[in-house]
Image (cartoon, rainbow, N blue to C red):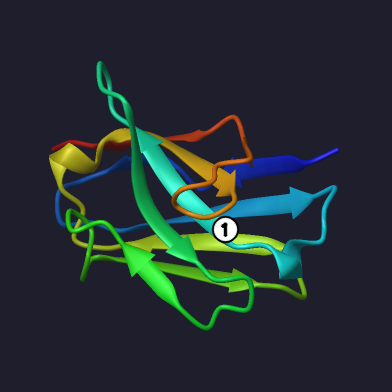
């Protein structure tokens, strides 16, 4: 079955950086678009970024554009999210999602990102 295991979250200061990883298994990773989504305390799930199955195109929410970079390594079945210039409003539980922006098919348990001074 599909397994998505996120890692790399933690505490960062405003302006700092973190790199999230997602180890995928149970499906053909190289054939599927992948997405990062997040949920801040008391708020709904928010789409963050999507990458095409072959890495040929990427999409970002306006709130993270220019600061976050999504990437994938199909040889390693791994999805990444490089987060730079972090803001306090980036604090959330970040989920690795199988599927594109409009088709969330499965997701992991999430990794917590907290941005605070």
**Residue ID at (57%, 58%):** 34
Farthest residue toward the bottom? Answer: 56
Asked if residue 117 is positioned above or below residue 63 in the image, the reply reads above
Task: Please count the marks in the image.
Answer: 1
Q: Quadrant of residue 60?
A: bottom left
**Residue ID at (13%, 38%):** 117
The image shows residue 9 at horizontal and vertical percentages of: 45, 42
The image shows residue 93 at horizontal and vertical percentages of: 40, 32
Towards the viewer: 73 or 19: 73
Mark 1 residue crowding within 10 angstroms, few (<14) / some (14–19) / many (20+): many
In the displayed structure image, the side of residue 68 where residue 20 appears, left or right:
right
Q: In which quarter of the image is residue 75?
A: bottom right
Asked if residue 19 is positioned above or below residue 66 in the image, the reply reads above
The image shows residue 25 at horizontal and vertical percentages of: 81, 50
In the displayed structure image, the side of residue 26 where residue 103 appears, left or right:
left
**Residue ID at (36%, 67%):** 59
The residue singled out by tag 1 in the image is 34
Q: In which quarter of the image is the N terminus?
A: top right
Asked if residue 105 is positioned above or below residue 60 in the image, the reply reads above
């Amino acid at each position: 079955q599909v397994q998505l295991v996120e890692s790399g979250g933690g505490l960062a200061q405003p302006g700092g950086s973190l790199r999230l990883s997602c180890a995928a298994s149970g499906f053909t990773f190289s054939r599927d678009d992948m997405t990062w989504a997040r949920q801040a305390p008391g708020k709904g799930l928010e789409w963050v970024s999507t990458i095409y199955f072959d890495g040929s195109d990427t999409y970002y929410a306006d709130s993270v554009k220019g600061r976050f970079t999504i990437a994938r390594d199909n040889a390693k079945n791994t999805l990444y999210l490089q987060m730079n210039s972090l803001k306090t409003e980036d604090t959330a539980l970040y989920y690795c999602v199988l599927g594109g922006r409009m088709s969330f098919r499965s997701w992991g348990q999430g990794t917590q990102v907290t941005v605070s001074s």
